[in-house]
Amino acid sequence: MKLAALDLTILFVYLAGIFILAQWVSREKAGHQKSASDYFLASKALPWWAIGASLIAANISAEQIIGMSGSGYAIGLAIASYEWMAAATLLIVGKFFLPVFLRNRIYTMPQFLEERYGHRIRTLMAVFWLGLYIFVNLTSILWLGSIAVAQVAGIDQMLALILLGVFALAYQLYGGLKAVALTDIVQVTLLVLGGLLVTALTLSKIGDGSVIAGYRTLLDAHPGHFDMILGKDNPFYKDLPGISVLIGGMWIMNVSYWGFNQYIIQRALAAKDLGEAQKGVIFAAFLKLLMPLVVVVPGIAAVMLAPELARPDQAYPTMMALLPSGILGLVFAALVAAIVASLASKINSIATIFTLDFYAKGKAEGRDQAHLVRVGRIAAAAAVALAILTARPLLGSFDQAFQYIQEYTGFFTPGIVVIFVLGLFWKRANEAGALAAAIGSFVLSIALKLAWPALPFIDRVGLVFLLALALAVAVSLLTPSGAGRDRIRTDDVGYGTPLSFNVAALAVAAILTALYAAYW
């Protein structure tokens, strides 16, 4: 594949434009110095469209575009459950979680844990999230993104990896979350447009100029790739175990990711008010319904257009090679946009957790604000350097990196969901129970993986969740309540939502029902 002059021009215009826009939207009024709230929470003034777009931009990156297209190539449309179930999860987050977080002025997830339980669980989970974000999330985006950039642009992969990391760091280093969130509407527009172009052109190639004919040909030739619920005879049943996708562990994975994940929920925590945050998550839910067209279908199309790929993760870059000049530049810019936006989101959240949950130790108001912002920028740079150095050793040997990410995080997510759900809705839960759930989740996951290797990891996640829940409840009841430590107010929280939210939620549910009925 070779980029023509027109493609390179489109790419450089995008890079220059988005960098300039990020600096412009994050400028401060004359005489005003950036505070920690300005840098880490965008001055708590994000509108709904920025929240919704930024949620998707933070989520959809190389591990989705490259990784899920690779899984679409290997498994089929069933991998889209990660996207469609996320849409349903966002409705729960908007209705039940955000009212508590915003009522209590939460700015990081470890802060919530300290105010609800105590400082030990805050420190434990802050360490976990920093490790996860740097050594799983940042590395996977850099690694998979560099594969695509190297293959399309014809440059060395390590050079591509370094350039992506440095640009994403520079892009958000001055403005923080405001620079990221207020430009993400541009990033998401480009991402969706570019992805739909790839889908349309690959299906059109299969259908001799007709997208509809191409879809029907693909469906007729590979009907198994359009099964949403895999049978036990499917070779990938262990990755997506049938009906468990709808009623089992995938709910736990999604609730953890969309409800209690700092680099995701941070956008909603920065909302102007609860109503704006809820409108933002509804907007994101509708975008999630669209995402399989962008990230999965091109991988399925590659089954016909490039059936002999050495690795599934080569599917999306290979489909890009079929695009004509000009469109290739636009789609390549969209891919880079997704990588940069997601990297910038995670970099900012790493800086937020390190600065506010370690360095400031929950006393940001008593610290010099400019100093905290400076510490955040140093933490961001250090995180990018670590991710660049460790990306190849950690991810170089995996064929389907998206599945690796899910498998790894599945060791911890059951405990995370237990801790937060009990913390939000059961006042008797205490720090001893929370610690038992956090440690028990990891230990039980390892034990089950070793003792029962044939158990699909999604089923393992669901089973460990139930065990960790029972453990947390038992330990909480057997130890002092710790009521004096609980500073989270829920007695005056209202969970009612406006008619517009309810109508939109019903629409999302109806579309999901129709999709699963059509591709069962």
Image (tube, rainbow, N blue to C red):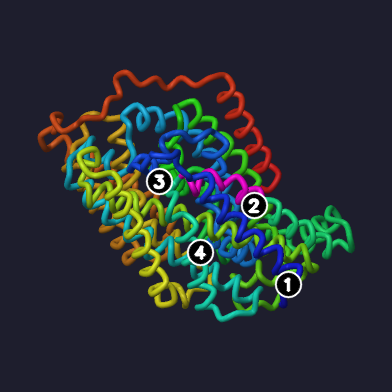
- Local crowd at mark 4 within 10 Å, few (<14), some, or many (≥20)? some
> In the image, is 30 to the left or to the right of 156?
left
Q: Label 1, on which residue? A: 321
Above or below for 481 versus 156: above
The answer to which of marks 4 and 1 sits earlier in the sequence is 4
Circle 3: is it few (<14), some (14-19), or many (20+) Cα within 10 Å?
many
The first of marks 3 and 2 along the sequence is 3
Verify whether residue 187 appears in magenta: yes
Please tell me which residue lies in front, 414 or 358. Answer: 358
Q: Position of residue 495 (x, y in %)?
A: 42, 22
- Please indicate whether residue 474 sits to the left or right of residue 213 in the image: left
Type of amino acid at the residue the image marks with label 1: Ala
* Mark with earlier residue (4, 3): 4
Residue 130 magenta: no
Under circle 2, the secondary element is helix
Q: Residue at x 47, y 77 (%)?
A: 397
Mark carried by residue 292 = 2
Q: Nearer the viewer, residue 312 or 364?
A: 364
Nearest to viewer (mark 4 / mark 3)? 4
Q: Nearer the viewer, residue 388 or 454?
A: 388
- Disc 3: which residue: 256
Magenta residues span 178-189
- Say whether residue 373 is left or right of residue 290: left
- Residue 248 seen anywhere in this rendered image of the structure: no
Query: What's the residue type where badge 4 is placed?
Result: Phe
Q: Majority secondary structure of the magenta segment? A: helix
Q: CA distance from mark 4 to mark 1?
A: 24 Å
C-alpha span from label 3 to label 2: 21 Å
Per the image, the residue denoted by label 4 is 167
> Which dot, 1 or 3, sits closer to the camera?
1
In the rendering, at what x and y percent does residue 493 appear?
A: 35, 21
